[in-house]
Amino acid sequence: MSPPRWPCHTSSTAPDQHDQRGVVRVTHPFHPWCGREFTFIDRHLAWDVDRVSFADENGEVASLPAAWTDIDPVDPFVVIAAGRCPFRVQDLLAAADLIDALRSPDVGKTTP
């Protein structure tokens, strides 16, 4: 799934006047800043990756993938699973379909 693309109606260096967040929290469990909050600056695409820029306590600007922060609402499946299920049903069904297709006796055969 590719990140959302927003139409650019204003300068990309100006802060987003519609975003009233103020802070962004790092949520990636293995990142050393996990749990820390930073001053939100903006959200943007860089090399087709949805990123969030923020300022640390020294005013230094940094950015992380948006998925590593709390910028978006949490996926309801993730909340309900509470860490018990690492895969979504539709992902498992897609994997099963792929395995079935690879097991098909017609795979790799060419017809004259």
Image: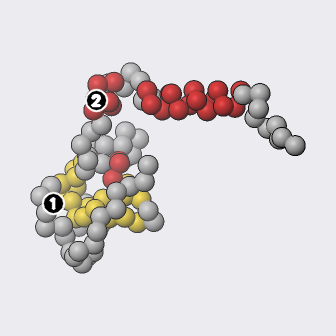
Q: Is residue 44 left or right of residue 2?
A: left
- Which residue position holds label 2? 79
Q: Earlier in the sequence, mark 2 or mark 1?
A: 1
Mark 2 residue type: Val
Query: On the image, which quarter does residue 45 sit in?
Result: bottom left
How far across and down, in percent of the image, does residue 12 sit?
A: 27, 74
Q: Is residue 103 left or right of residue 77?
A: right
Mark 1 residue type: Asp
How far across and down, in percent of the image, does residue 37 sit?
A: 22, 50
**Considering the numbered disc 2 on the image, is that residue within a helix, a strand or a loop?**
helix
Q: For the C terminus, which image quadrant?
A: top right
Q: Residue furthest top?
A: 84
Q: Residue furthest bottom?
A: 11
Q: How many numbered tags mark residues here?
A: 2
The relative height of residue 43 versus residue 13 in the rendered view (above or below) is above
Which residue lies at the image location 41% right of the left edge and 24% below the top edge? Answer: 85
Tell me if residue 64 can be seen. no
| Frontmost residue, 36 versus 17 | 17
- Which residue position holds label 1? 19
Which residue lies at the image location 42% right of the left edge and 59% below the top edge? Answer: 49
Which residue lies at the image location 35% right of the left edge and 48% below the top edge? Answer: 67
